[in-house]
């Protein structure tokens, strides 16, 4: 059984600063409500730490902001935060979110009863999310090569932002120990990845969109990201390029609603169901069927 991490002065100050940056109310009552009662208790048990007020001051917090700075958690805010993580391609498993955004999980459970119910309320498939991807060395290398072939930015910063599960798996000691080592093992020079990256300029974006369209790919953003072109999509949205994904599609000479399969109301088009119409047999065929039925009956 893993030992609990001790609430040291350094850990307490770091946690308080993180809460402050997240816009949380730093009153004792709210910090306890967030599930950090152990930290509050540690402050009052250790005479060297003084009082809660003294600890806040030591963390560099302006006491005049306490109690009035909090962004209140609401069901809407919880769903918005979930959607932001989903759109950013971040891991939405309970374990990952609890490590990165503990207070989001606490609020989700408070309003929806469980993290699973909060995800379902956000319109996400919980069964898909909870499937933990099993990474092997071979799978990591294959994925790196796929991203390289798609023109993705393979720098560590871009990968942690756009493909965090891959970055974490590559950095695992059981695999490569670092992202740089994984890149080298894939036959790519990491120094080249860091220094020389082909930019997604307007011409390259347009050419890639046309190429994907010619291959029959659905150009809606979720599919573009799935194909490994997240960096291109982000570049297309920049004001210096097209300002939006729609703008990039139209600059490539394509009809946005058609290639993303949206109807006029902005909803996903459904493929029409094919109905098979019963064809009436020719008179001679019909007579033959009747003769066959009579023979079977006799």
Image: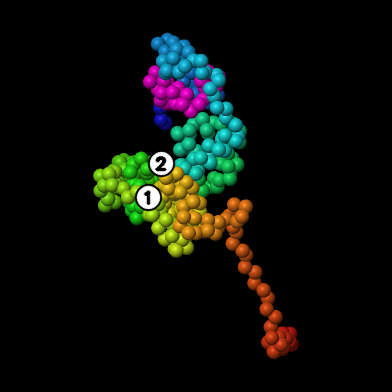
User: Residue 161 — which label?
Assistant: 2
Residue identifier under label 1: 200
Q: Nearer the viewer, residue 23 or 138?
A: 23
The kind of secondary structure the magenta stretch mainly shows is helix
Could you tell me if the residues under marks 1 and 2 are in contact, i.e. CB atoms within 8 Å? no
CA gap between label 1 and label 2 equals 17 Å
Q: Which residues are magenta?
A: 4-32
In this view of the protein, can residue 63 be seen by the observer?
yes
Q: Nearer the viewer, residue 136 or 201?
A: 201
Name the residue: 55% across, 56% down.
257
Name the secondary structure under disc 2. Answer: helix
For residue 163, side relative to residue 129 (left or right) = left
Q: Position of residue 32 (x, y in %)?
A: 53, 22
Q: Does the magenta run of residues contain 27?
A: yes
For residue 290, side relative to residue 98 (left or right) = right
Q: Nearer the viewer, residue 84 or 106?
A: 84
């Amino acid at each position: 059984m893993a030992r609990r991490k001790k609430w040291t002065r350094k850990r307490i100050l770091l946690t308080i600063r993180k809460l402050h940056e997240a816009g949380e109310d730093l009153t004792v009552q709210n910090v306890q409500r967030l599930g950090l009662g152990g930290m509050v208790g540690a402050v009052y048990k250790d005479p060297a730490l003084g009082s809660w007020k003294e600890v806040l001051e030591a963390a560099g917090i302006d006491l005049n902001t306490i109690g009035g700075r909090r962004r209140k958690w609401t069901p809407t805010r919880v769903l918005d935060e979930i959607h932001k993580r989903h759109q950013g391609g971040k891991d939405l498993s309970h374990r990952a979110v609890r490590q990165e955004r503990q207070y989001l999980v606490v609020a989700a459970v408070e309003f929806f009863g469980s993290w699973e119910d909060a995800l379902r309320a956000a319109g996400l498939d919980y069964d898909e999310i909870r499937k933990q991807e099993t990474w092997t060395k071979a799978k990591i290398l294959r994925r790196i090569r796929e991203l390289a072939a798609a023109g993705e930015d393979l720098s560590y910063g871009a990968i942690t932002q756009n493909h965090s599960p891959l970055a974490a798996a590559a950095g695992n000691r059981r695999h490569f120990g670092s992202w740089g080592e994984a890149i080298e093992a894939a036959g790519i020079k990491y120094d080249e990845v860091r220094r020389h990256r082909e930019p997604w300029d307007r011409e390259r974006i347009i050419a890639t969109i046309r190429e994907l369209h010619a291959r029959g790919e659905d150009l809606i953003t979720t599919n573009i990201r799935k194909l490994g072109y997240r960096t291109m999509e982000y570049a297309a949205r920049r004001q210096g390029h097209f300002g939006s994904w729609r703008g990039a599609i139209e600059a490539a000479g394509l009809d946005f609603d058609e290639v993303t399969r949206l109807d006029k109301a902005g909803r996903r088009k459904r493929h029409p169901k094919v109905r098979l119409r019963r064809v009436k047999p020719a008179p001679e065929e019909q007579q033959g069927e009747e003769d066959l039925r009579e023979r079977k009956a006799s």
